[in-house]
Structures are given as C-alpha cells and as structure tokens.
Amino acid sequence: MIKGQTAIVTGSTSGIGLGIARALAAEGADIMLNGFGDAATIETLRADLVREFAVQVLYNGADLSKAAQCEDLIVDTERRLGKVDILVNNAGIQHVARVENFPTDRWDAVIAINLSSAFHTIRKVLPGMQGRGSGRIINIASTHGLVASAEKAAYVAAKHGIVGLTKVVALENAESPITCNAICPGWVLTPLVQTQIEARATREGIAVAVAERELLLEKQPTARFTTVEQLGALVVFLAGPGAANITGAALPVDGGWTAR
Ligand code: NAD
C-alpha cells in the first residue's frame, strides 16, 4: 500500500521525475519535490499535485551536486513529513563530447549529480528505513547503465556506477524488507533528450522531426519513446507489495535497445 507513505523524488520539477512524483501522488503518497526551475512554476506544479491528488506535497530546492545539500534533503523531509518510505534518485544531467574534448568540470558535474548524489541520499536515508524495517530505494539509471554510446563518457560511467551502487545497497539490506533497484529507461522525450535532438538537427542540417526519428531508430527498435507515465507505473510497482522480492535489479524500459 503506497497510500500514506512518504516519497522523495529528486529532479522532480521536470520530465521523468515529475512523472514519477505524479504517479506516486496518484497512489496517495505524500511527496517531497526537488529540482531547479522558476519558483512560481514550481509552486504551480506543487499546488496542482495537492489539488489533484489530495496529498501533502512539499518542495526542497537542494542542489544535488553538493553532498551537504543531498543530506539536508533527507533530513528536511524526515523533519517535515515524518519519515521517508520511498526514495527515488532521479536528478540527472548530460554532456556530450568525445573523451579527449570532454571538459573536466562537466565530468565532475555529471558524476556528482548522476552518481554521487545517490550515494549521499541513500547513505542518509538508510538508518531511518532500517530503524522502521521498511523502505524502497529506486534509482533512475539508463540503458547507459548497461551499454555505452560514444561521446557520453561521464554519463555512461555515472549510470554504470549507479547500477553497481544499487546492487551493493540491495545486498547489504537483503535480509530486511528494504529493497533497492535501478530502472534503465531508453529514450524518453524530455528536455534532456530534446536538447540532444535539436543539437543533432543543427549538426546535420536536418529538420527537428527528422532528427527525432533518426535518434529513435538508431537505438530503440520499437521506434517509440518510453513515456514518463510508463516509468511512473514501474516505480509504483517497485514501491508496492508485489515487488517485495525484487532487489538489486536493473530493469530496462527501453523498447528493445539492450536486446540487440
Ligand atoms: P530533465 O532535464 O527533464 O529533468 C532533470 C531534473 O533534474 C530536473 O528537475 C532538474 O531541475 C533536476 N536537476 C538537474 N540538476 C540538478 C541538481 N544539481 N540538483 C537538483 N536537481 C537537479 O531530464 P529527464 O530526462 O527527466 O531525466 C531524469 C533522469 O532520467 C536522469 O537521471 C536521466 O539521466 C534519466 N534518463 C533519462 C532518459 C531520457 O531519455 N530522457 C533516459 C534514460 C535515463
């Protein structure tokens, strides 16, 4: 039963994180939103979730590139919502360049936000979960946690890393009811991917719609984007009783990308 539980979804002011927050709120979970954006827009998102689903929804603007702010996000949620039953580590950024041209500050930022932030939040949330003898940790990795693509060194390293972190946390808590799993989406049409489509259109001098189709066909055999609603539904399943014995898994939702 997710109703009455409390969930943190990092990077939930946009894209996949917002879809996951909506799905958990629809099941009756109280939500801590996190992520960047215009304050008035975020307040509208927050108030809309409260109105639509009649749950508590709070916001914490922690910058997850900073270890102390990752920890503060957990402490603040425990203080304001009482506990954290479900932690979804979703915040992420991308930078695309060949290794020899990869700016070191972009490497550091991608590793900090896409990998280290999950270590810091998990480390801080576990004692409370262990004390209550329950908890679900869900890390949004990527197909790039399972296979690589050129020009994504930091992202692929971070996503392989978070799949490894997921397995270790699962093993260390295996005899308790706490589970830790990773979801590995293929292409999802969010601002993070829209930027890559537009860059491709500019680079190749083609229409954005053509670039979108090319990007899909290159990797994702179904030629359909994974949707944020599909990812929200999987998070709801992983947070529910049916998934009690799924732990340490890296679950692709990738239209066949990693079947090739
Ligand atoms: P998005 O750009 O729409 O959203 C990213 C979210 O992270 C935003 O809310 C943003 O404000 C937040 N964020 C960025 N830096 C942050 C920081 N320093 N501190 C706190 N929040 C921060 O991207 P998305 O496509 O929804 O991606 C969400 C996750 O899903 C990422 O981890 C991404 O790697 C992963 N993913 C995306 C795709 C895809 O095709 N879109 C595929 C596989 C995995």
Image: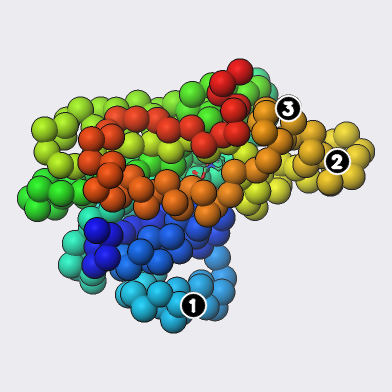
Q: Earlier in the sequence, mark 2 or mark 3?
A: 2
- Distance, label 2 to label 1, CA atoms, is 35 Å
Q: Report the residue marked by disc 2.
A: 210
Q: Residues within 10 Å of mark 3 (few under 14, many from 20)?
A: few
Q: Secondary structure at mark 2?
A: helix
User: Is disc 1's CB within 8 Å of ligand 1?
Assistant: no
User: Is disc 2's CB within 8 Å of ligand 1?
Assistant: no
The residue at 73%/27% (across/down) is: 218
Q: Secondary structure at mark 3?
A: helix
- Distance, label 2 to label 3, CA atoms, is 12 Å
| Left or right position of 234 against 168 | right
The residue at 15%/49% (across/down) is: 134
The residue at 32%/75% (across/down) is: 56
Q: Report the residue marked by disc 3.
A: 218
Q: Earlier in the sequence, mark 2 or mark 1?
A: 1
Quadrant that contains the C terminus: top right
